[in-house]
Image: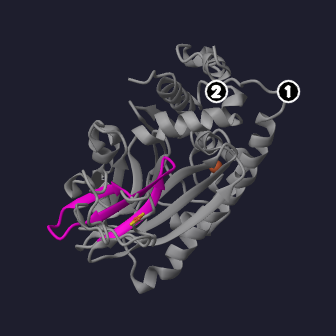
Amino acid sequence: MSSTDDRLAQFDASLPLAEAFTLPGSWYTDPAIAALEQDRVFARSWQLIARTDQVARPGEFVTAEVAGEPILVIRGKDGVLRAFFNVCRHHAAAVLTEPAGCAERLRCPYHGWTYALDGTLKATPEFDGVRHFDRSQHGLVPVQVATWDPFVFVNLAADPPPLMAHLAPMVEQLRPRAIEGMHFVERREYELACNWKVFVDNYLDGGYHIPFLHESLDQVLAFKEYTIENFERVCLQSSPIAPSKVDPTISAVRKGQALYYWVYPNFMVNSYEGYLDTNLVVPLGIDRMKVIFDFYFTDVSEELRALNQQSMDVGQRIQDEDHAICESVQRGLRSRAYQAGRLSVRREAGENLFHRLLAGDLGQREP
Ligand code: FES
Ligand SMILES: [Fe+2]
């Protein structure tokens, strides 16, 4: 048995929550596990790649890395949204090099091979005399793409389950909050020196850390009424908001029922009344990651500009507190003193769902 198989065998996904352990520390520190995750988790799940408004018009595109692969999503002249590997069929250069923009056609910057917006190869300079070369077989390689209101997702698997099945029941449950009418305001990105799973674990601990780490948030969340609900690949954490007596800046921007959705493996949707932010957790190596926050508001009028800014700043403060603790955890996970931890039955069912799903995917044999 290889050492990776050894490591995978160290986690028992069949234990009930009251007997369960966390993932072994080595899963957060072994580069072989990170490589396996790219292949079996990120390349086989729906991944957020763009906002629908970025690719609304023909020719508009977004490029991004998904599961360590260069991917592009683009609206065709026929109005159809498509995604491709952003890899030229000649010698593999990235065909589109801008993060976003609008293109008439897709011309590779290396030797000028040119593709139509639907991926078909149209021009190959100085290629006369090349035998057994069928241009129609050298289009960009397509990737599955689907949208949910403001969000565009891709899946590198050939035949994935439908996006809506992956997101269920979140989409239905969020319908009353009219997400389709919300306006994107700002993106903020943070890099952390920890494994991506540390960040997800922290998110999924059922509010366990809130009274200790987030004093300000603790004043408005009704900690005792905090609920945790697991679905197939989604966990919903929810709490009523109580007005803060201590810090009115928080209660001014956090209203209604707080709904915190996590979608396996690395996507979060946080919703308050009139407010939404998404978090996309991107691994950059075994002990480095990036989290991308996108902020949306129902009302983006001038009168509310200051309040919306304040709302994003509250998010930033909480993120800063999480940042330091996640890096502290990563250092501890490397310690010879730590193998795996136990889970609170009251609080940490979401974390356990994450660990079981991940272990299931990693343990899957190649078809
Ligand atoms: S690599 Fe794209 S044209 Fe040569
Ligand atoms: Fe937190």
Q: Amino acid at mark 2?
A: Leu
x and y percent of residue 73 in the render? Answer: 33, 61
Q: Is residue 73 magenta?
A: yes
**Picture disc at residue 23:** 2
Q: Is residue 116 above or below residue 364?
A: below
Q: CA distance from mark 2 to mark 1?
A: 15 Å
Mark sitting earlier along the chain (2/1):
2
Q: Is residue 105 left or right of residue 156?
A: left
**Picture disc at residue 337:** 1
Q: Is residue 66 left or right of residue 330?
A: left
Q: At 53% from the left edge and 81% from the top edge, which residue is drawn?
A: 306
Q: At 33% from the left edge and 55% from the top edge, which residue is drawn?
A: 84
Whether residue 276 is visible: no
Q: Which residues are magenta?
A: 60-85
Q: At 26% from the left edge and 58% from the top edge, which residue is drawn?
A: 82
Q: Quadrant of residue 263?
A: top left
State the predominant SS element of the stretch in magenta: strand
Q: Amino acid at mark 1?
A: Ala
Q: Is residue 9 above or below residue 52?
A: above
Mark 2 nearby-residue class (10 Å; few <14, some 14–19, many ≥20): many
x and y percent of residue 69 in the render? Answer: 47, 51
Using the image as rendered, state which of residue 7 and residue 53 is in the foreground. Answer: 7
Number of marks drawn: 2
Look at the image and tell me in which quarter the C terminus lies: top left
Using the image as rendered, state which of residue 333 and residue 315 is in the foreground. Answer: 333
Q: Is residue 240 magenta?
A: no
Q: Is residue 147 left or right of residue 226?
A: left
Look at the image and tell me in which quarter the N terminus lies: top right
Q: Quadrant of residue 199?
A: top right
The outermost residue toward the left is 78
Q: Are marks 2 and 1 in contact (CB under 8 Å)?
A: no
